[in-house]
Image: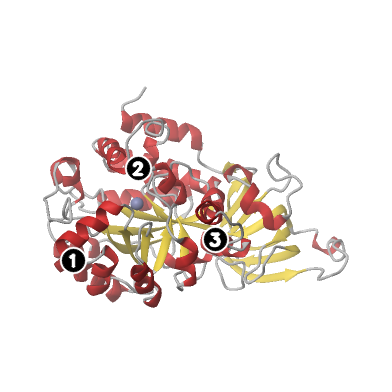
């Protein structure tokens, strides 16, 4: 039995508007067994002397952060495409070029480094939206799930939990055009064959789980959507889908089906409480109602949406409609959950020219509990008895955070302010360093390998 007592200078407890000072957090075998504010309204030093054995956590301790939408290999494009002109579609061509150099070995090395970068940023669980399934030309590997297995192994080596969102990707457009060139590696032929391949993949559910994804209405014909949705429902697994990231997708969907993408997904049983729509940048008012009434979640990816010139999704309107909001770093233009979280609020300010749309505790929920729930982990993302012992400590004495009130970290801190990360009771990041991965060196090596750069 591994029991540890942690003494957090501040900890952000569930349903609290702001952090609580001097909280004793007890963990046994990877679970939280006690959360005790030591001095409610009293002397903050009282009682501390008897806790000589407790591990001190200076700063603010948060629950584990969840990155609900990742394409690990996009990390190789960081800083290589951002200075150029173009839009989502021209960026996508550059992204496809990287896929040509990925195989199970190079992807394991790259994803291990990316997931370790996430750990340094306080991310303890990632949702990998995985569609690069097959070898060149679409030829399956000897193990047809070799690429997914590489991602699961990468997360295990990096020390974070993963939900592999095995993605059905069949066509190049809403008109049913066939996959060509780099896209051939994404396809399984039809949804039934996707389902059979995905069903053959199993994991140790303590550390990694398998969910499903519809890449988008561009990539899965309407008459095959229900196959993917049923697969997820039968397994009680999360189901994700890219939705209305671009107005062009809405226009094409209306032209072919006479429905918005959201309307089409609703008609084919894709929406529901286990479903997360990624982006939802350009929904109609009726779409927001459909998503809210079905309790479908939305994963915002603000740093990617700004980088790709996608636009601003109606975050507050969606939250008011009852849609749980989570956050993802998607293309990994940056990996910084604090930047994603504050963008929920700051983007609303840009749109409305008013401040104060999301309370700091709502940003916390999106970055933690809602993200874990969207990935199928209902026992993580809160500092609560019975939950997984994931503790993310943010320093309050850096050049960015000195003098900041603890609730203000969402607007002041960055990934570099995360000093310690505990996952399932084990220290993974100590003094801002990953305990077993030299993250910058492994990123540089892995990215050189897949971009051909020296
Ligand atoms: Zn995506």
Toward the viewer: 255 or 428? 255
When the figure is inspected, residue 57 is found, relative to residue 114, above or below; the finding is below
Residue 199: horizontal and vertical position, in percent? Answer: 23, 65
Question: In this rendering, does residue 372 appear at all?
Answer: no
Residue 424, label in figure: 3
Q: Residues within 10 Å of mark 2 (few under 14, many from 20)?
A: many
Residue 73, label in figure: 2
Picture residue at 16% right of the left edge, 54% below the top: 171
Q: CA separation, marks 1 and 3? A: 48 Å
Mark 1 residue element: loop
Mark 3 residue element: loop
Horizontal placement of 57 versus 85: left or right? right
When the figure is inspected, residue 78 is found, relative to residue 18, above or below; the finding is above
Horizontal placement of 443 versus 224: left or right? right
Q: Earlier in the sequence, mark 1 or mark 2?
A: 2
Q: For the residue with label 3, is its CB less than 8 Å from the closest atom of ligand 1?
A: no
Q: CA separation, marks 1 and 2? A: 35 Å
Q: Earlier in the sequence, mark 1 or mark 3?
A: 1
Q: Which residue is mark 1?
A: 258
Q: For the residue with label 1, is its CB less than 8 Å from the closest atom of ligand 1?
A: no
Q: Residues within 10 Å of mark 1 (few under 14, many from 20)?
A: few
Toward the viewer: 263 or 9? 263
Q: CA separation, marks 2 and 3? A: 26 Å
Toward the viewer: 119 or 270? 270
Q: Earlier in the sequence, mark 2 or mark 3?
A: 2
């Amino acid at each position: 039995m591994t029991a540890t007592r942690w003494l957090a200078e501040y900890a952000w407890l569930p349903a609290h508007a702001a952090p609580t000072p001097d909280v004793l957090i007890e963990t046994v075998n990877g679970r939280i067994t006690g959360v005790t504010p030591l001095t409610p309204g009293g002397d903050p030093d009282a009682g501390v002397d008897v806790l000589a054995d407790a591990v001190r956590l200076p700063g603010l301790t948060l629950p584990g952060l969840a990155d609900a939408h990742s394409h690990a290999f996009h990390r190789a494009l960081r800083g290589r495409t951002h200075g150029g002109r173009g839009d989502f579609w021209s960026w996508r061509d550059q992204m496809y070029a990287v896929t040509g150099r990925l195989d199970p070995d190079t992807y394991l090395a790259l994803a291990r480094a990316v997931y370790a970068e996430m750990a340094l940023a306080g991310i303890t669980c990632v949702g990998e939206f995985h569609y690069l399934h097959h070898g060149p030309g679409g030829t399956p590997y000897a193990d047809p799930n070799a690429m997914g297995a590489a991602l699961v192994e990468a997360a295990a080596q990096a020390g974070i939990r993963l939900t592999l969102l095995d993605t059905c990707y069949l066509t190049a457009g809403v008109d049913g055009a066939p996959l060509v060139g780099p896209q051939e590696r994404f396809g399984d032929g039809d949804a039934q064959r996707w389902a059979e391949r995905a069903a053959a993949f199993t994991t140790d559910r303590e550390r990694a789980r398998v969910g499903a994804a519809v890449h988008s209405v561009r990539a899965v014909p309407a008459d095959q959507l229900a196959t993917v949705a049923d697969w997820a429902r039968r397994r009680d697994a999360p189901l994700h889908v890219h939705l209305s990231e671009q107005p062009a997708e809405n226009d094409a969907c209306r032209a072919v089906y006479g429905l918005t993408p959201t309307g089409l997904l609703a008609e084919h049983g894709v929406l529901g409480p286990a479903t997360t729509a990624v982006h939802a940048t350009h929904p109609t008012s009726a779409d927001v109602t459909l998503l809210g009434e079905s309790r479908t979640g939305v994963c915002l990816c603000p740093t990617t949406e700004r980088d790709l010139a996608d636009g601003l999704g109606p975050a507050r309107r969606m939250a008011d409609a009852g849609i749980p909001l989570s956050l993802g770093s998607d293309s990994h233009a940056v990996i910084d959950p604090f930047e994603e979280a504050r963008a929920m609020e700051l983007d609303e300010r840009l749109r409305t020219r008013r401040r104060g749309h999301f309370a700091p505790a709502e940003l916390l929920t999106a970055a933690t509990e809602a993200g874990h729930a969207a990935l199928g982990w209902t026992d993580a993302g809160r500092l609560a008895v019975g939950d997984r012992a994931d503790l993310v400590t943010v320093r309050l004495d850096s050049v960015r955070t000195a003098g900041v009130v603890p609730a203000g970290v969402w607007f002041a801190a960055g990934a570099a302010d995360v000093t310690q990360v505990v996952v399932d009771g084990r220290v993974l990041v100590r003094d801002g360093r990953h305990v077993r991965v030299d993250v910058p060196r492994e990123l540089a090596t892995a990215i050189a390998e897949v971009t051909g750069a020296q």
